[in-house]
Image (spheres, helix red, strand yellow):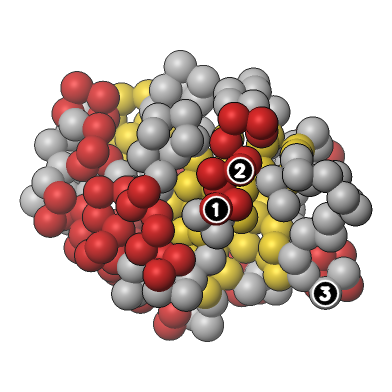
Amino acid sequence: MPQTGGACVRPTVFDIDLYVDAEIAGNNSTLNTAGVKAIHAKGAKAVCYIDAGSIEEFRPDYQQFVDWHESHGNSLLGKPFSEEFPNERWANINNDRGQRDFLLKMMEPRVDKCVQAGFDGVEFDVVHAHEEGKEVTGWDISPETQLIYNRALADLAHRKGLSVALKNDLSQIEDLVSVFDYAVNEECFQYSECADLSAFVRAGKPVFQVEYKTSPGSFCAKANQLKFNSIKKASDYSLYDKPYKPCK
C-alpha cells in the first residue's frame, strides 16, 4: 500500500541483479532468467543491475580483475567501497595503463548476459567516483574522465538493445541526461540533493528513487510533487524484495 493510502500498487519496473542470489541458487553464476520471465509474465519490465565502478569479490569474473590489477602495477583496484560493502573496491577508470579500456571490455560480456537473461534495461552502479575523491576511492578521477566512462557505458547498453539508467552522479546530470533513458537514485532526500534529478523529469524520462534511513512520511509528499517514482526500502540496506513502501 502506498504511503498516501489507497489500493496496493502493482509495480511495473523491477531492478534486480543479473544473477540469482547465491543463498538461493547455491552458486554465484546463475543468471536471473527465471526472475525476468516472472516479471514479464506480470506485464512489467526488468532492469539488470551491474556494478561498473567498483569490483565485487563475489562475482564470477572477479579473478580476471585481480589478475589484470596485479599485472598492471596494482593500478585497478582501489579502496573498499564502504563500511556497509567492504567486499567491493573502487575501480580506477583512468586510462593511463588501459584501465578504462579493460573495464569496458569486462562490462561487455556482463551486458551480453543481461540480454541473454531477457532483461529490458541495465543499471550501471557506482559511476560517481569523481565526486568522492582520492581519499575515499584511492584514485584521482576527474569529472571529464567520469563523463567519458559513463557515456561509454550508455553507448554499450544501447548497442546491445537495452535501455540504460544513470545511477546517482547527480553533479553530471545535465551532461548525461541526453544519453541515459532514466535515472536511478539512492538517498537524495536524506542528503538534500534531489533537485538535480528534475532534469530527467523535464526531459520526459523517469526517476526511480529509493530511501533507506528516511521515513516515507518525511519524503514521499515531496517525491510525488517532483514526479519521482520513490520507495522506502529496509534501513539496513538489505536488497531483498521486502519490506518496501511505495510513495504512490
Q: Secondary structure at mark 1?
A: helix
Amino acid on which disc 2 is placed: Ala
Residue at position x 39%, y 54% in the image? 197
Compared with 101, 219 (above or below) is above
Give the position of the N terminus as an image quadrant: top right
Q: Position of 234 compared to 207: left or right?
A: right
Asked whether disc 1 touches disc 3, contact meaning CB atoms under 8 Å apart, the reply is no
Q: Is residue 107 visible?
A: no
The residue where tag 2 is placed is 221
Q: Position of residue 175 (x, y in %)?
A: 23, 65
Q: Residues within 10 Å of mark 3 (few under 14, many from 20)?
A: few
**Circle 1: residue type:** Gln
Q: Position of residue 96 (x, y in %)?
A: 9, 51
Residue 133, compared with residue 53, is above or below; it is above
User: Which residue corresponds to mark 3?
Assistant: 43
Q: Name which residue type carries label 3.
A: Gly
Dot 2: what SS? helix
**As drawn, which residue projects farthest toward the left?**
96
Q: Earlier in the sequence, mark 2 or mark 3?
A: 3
Q: Which mark is residue 225?
A: 1
Q: Gap between marks 1 and 3, in whole Å? A: 27 Å
Q: Which mark is residue 91?
A: none
- Report if residue 14 is visible in the image: yes
- Marks 2,1: beta carbons within 8 A: yes
Count residues near mark 2 (Cα–Cα under 10 Å), then give few for <14, some for 14-19, many for 20+.
some
Q: Residue at x 47, y 59 (%)?
A: 183
Q: Quadrant of residue 153?
A: bottom left
The alpha-carbon separation of the residues under discs 2 and 3 comes to 28 Å
Residue 205 coordinates in the image, percent (x, y): 48, 71
For residue 117, side relative to residue 60 (left or right): right
